[in-house]
Amino acid sequence: MNMGNDKLLVKDKDVVVPGEVLAQGMNYLPGQGTYRYNDKIIANRLGLLTIEGKVLKTMPLAGRYLPKKNDIIIGRVIDILISGWKLDINSAYPAVLPLKDATFGYIAKGADLTKYFELDDYVVVKITNVTSQNLVDVTCKGQGLHKLKGGRIIKVNTHKVPRIIGKKGSMVSLIKKATGCKIIVGQNGTTWISGEPEMEVVTVNAIKMIEEQAHKSGLTDKVKSYLEKATGKKIEVRIKE
Amino acid sequence: MMNQDLKAHINEALKKGVRLDGRKKEEYRKIEIRTGVIATAEGSALVKCGDTEVIAGVKLGIGEPYPDSPDEGVLIVGSELLPLSNPEFETGPPSIDAIEVARVIDRGIREGKTINTKKLCIEKGECVWTVMIDVLPLNYDGNLIDIGGIAALAALKDAKMLEVNDNKVVYGKRTKQSLPIMSMPVPVTILKIGDNLIVDPTEAEEAVLDARLTVSILEDGTLCALQKGGDASLSVKDINEMINLAVKKSQDIRRKIYEAL
Amino acid sequence: MESRYNKRLDGRGFEETRPIIARAGVINKADGSAMFRIGRTTAYAAVYGPRELHPKHLQDPKKGVLRCNYNMMPFSAEERVRPGPSRRSREISMVTEKALLPVVNLEDYPNAVVDVFIELIETDAGSRCAGICAASIALADAGIIMKDMVAAVSTGVIDHRIVIDLDGEEEHLADLDVADIPIAMIPSTEEITLLQMDGKASKEELFRAIEMVKPVLKRIAEVQRKALKEKYKG
């Protein structure tokens, strides 16, 4: 065993790119976003490197949303079917909201479905099933799942959503507190914002700032600083990093 | 796709003077103009306005004049909505929207007598200069007619004539002589959303417009081209207000173009 | 073999490329994008996808489809290029796709398409290679899983002299035999994904050219990777 030749060429939280050699030697193991070629571990997607013991893996920094069961997302009604509604969920794959999952009430056969959801309505839904061909079923029955009224929609990179929400929702709470806006961030990146027009703009700017700097540290302070400047008032809130 | 809910929301915000990106109703995004960016073009310009980025190139040639104007050079404006610049654009022949952009920019330049086409005549009825302007978005986030129009004007101003050998153009051999430019008709598009008038719309604002009016304006305030778009109708009062706003904004735009040249 | 081409027209070394500039993330609405400039040849690439693929009969239920579209802007060449696809641009679109396919993994995207649009805003030879380089950066920028970049450059054999990165002037040399050999390669494995040739060369000259271009393509791949990292700095 060539233990002497084992070499780690990158460090934790480095931005790595396809083809980049991360480590040499059989001592290291390839995790998500990396692969082994001969005695090298190489990155196979643009991502943030994380080192867990001997395992090298990357958190993706880019890419479209891939539907996952139990994700709460925001979709837009693009078609009314006999069996329900078809939604654009900002992914390569549309979702279907079946009649039985639209509401807790009873919908008669042949009823006018537009009474519930119309074309271009935005809805907060939960993914109940994803097939191997990426056919997606969603439900609107449940806590926090409903049609959206008013406000505006922006689209953010799905991979930045965890950062925008923050640990236990701390980041999005910070923005809500500062701007007074209602905010719902879908796992698919589709985000709903509702409040005073000027505060909505501040919210959008704060979210864009997080999107652009998601891979950097000290972000919470930068965002807090921007929000205080933009709203002209200090924010008193306990922040968990 | 127009979302009535979103449109109502934008309207409410506009009533308070706030646009989706925080701009005021009469505020343009930051405009940057660079000329001489493409060496293979006889004249070129790259114009950035917010997230919209348009490139215009001028190619010169020699050909036959149109039969009804035997002593005038030929001017052609082309445009395409490149699928590179926006997820909504598809490959294929120019869509009607692309055709409208090209024709409206063309109308402004042609009717504003930007180029003295009589000076582009080499031999009456036989041989004239052809000026082909192509206006293409690299990044599309609204207001292509205005930004494309500005890029076309800057590219024309940047252009230099080519050497001619035996009535054939020698590509790559540039002279110091500019095109015979006589005027600068600046296009300004005003959007009507509800009762609000805005300039320099983003893609999101264009999606909820009721109507729009593109006005091409000369230095002295004379109008030389108009185009109404959008599904809704305009009252005479609307048109008056829109034209006044367009003329006012054209002065800022014209100054920006001159600063860049 | 002796050669009469002993000094390059622009004074470059035989293995020297023209100056290269590469940038990632230049087109905001795209999922991934890049600009790649070599000498004056400038290519922009935008990636949209994975997204829904229409018409349905083009869909692959096992994996996503890669679709490349190469186009030259009308003012990008000395003689104006008529807008619209030509036989040449369609062929280049196809070989570009074939050059990129071996590195990408689209298994996570059955029935979907990853569209790559390449626009040449200015050309001075080597345009298909610049397009491939830009497309490669753009695909990585879009988060597509790829085992490596794909780097490409035009090599040439001018009167038995092997040169790297043929420029427009060299391409049009009238009094010497010129062979234009665009080559694309996966840097980590040295596998070739694009190989075309226009002109005469001996088999031995061809293989020498391939050997000579390998280190150049590895350097170009480093430039491509650096462009991606630059986007996340600062």
Image: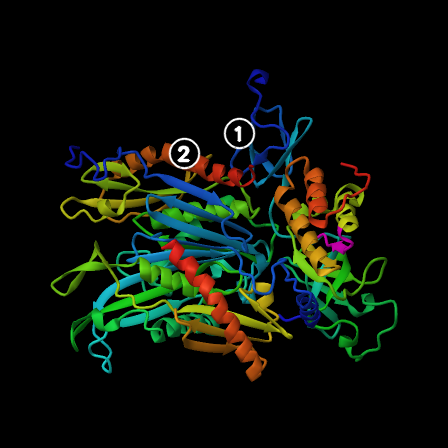
The residue lying furthest to the top in this view is A4
The residue lying furthest to the front in this view is B220
Q: Do labels 2 and 1 share a chain?
A: no
Q: Mark 2 points at which residue?
A: C219
The answer to whether C159 appears left or right of A106 in the picture is left
Dot 1 falls on which chain?
Answer: A
Residue C1, image quadrant: top left
Q: Identify whether C97 is placed above or below A114.
A: above
Q: Residue B125 location, x and y as percent? A: 17, 78
Task: Examine the rendering and report whether any part of residue B173 can be seen.
Answer: yes
Number of marks drawn: 2
Residue C79, image quadrant: bottom left
**Which segment is the magenta one?**
A179-188
Q: Which residue is drawn at 34% across and 63% down?
A: C86
Color encoding of the figure: rainbow
Please, what is the three-letter code of the amino acid marked with disc 1? Asn
Q: Name the residue under label 1.
A: A38
Q: Residue at x 67, y 35 (%)?
A: A217
Question: Is A183 one of the magenta-colored residues?
Answer: yes
For this rendering, which residue is in front, B224 or C231?
A: B224
Question: The residue tagged with tag 2: helix, strand or loop?
Answer: helix
Between circles 2 and 1, the one closer to the viewer is: 2
The answer to whether A151 appears left or right of B124 in the picture is right
Please, what is the three-letter code of the amino acid marked with disc 2? Arg
For this rendering, which residue is in front, A164 or C13?
A: A164
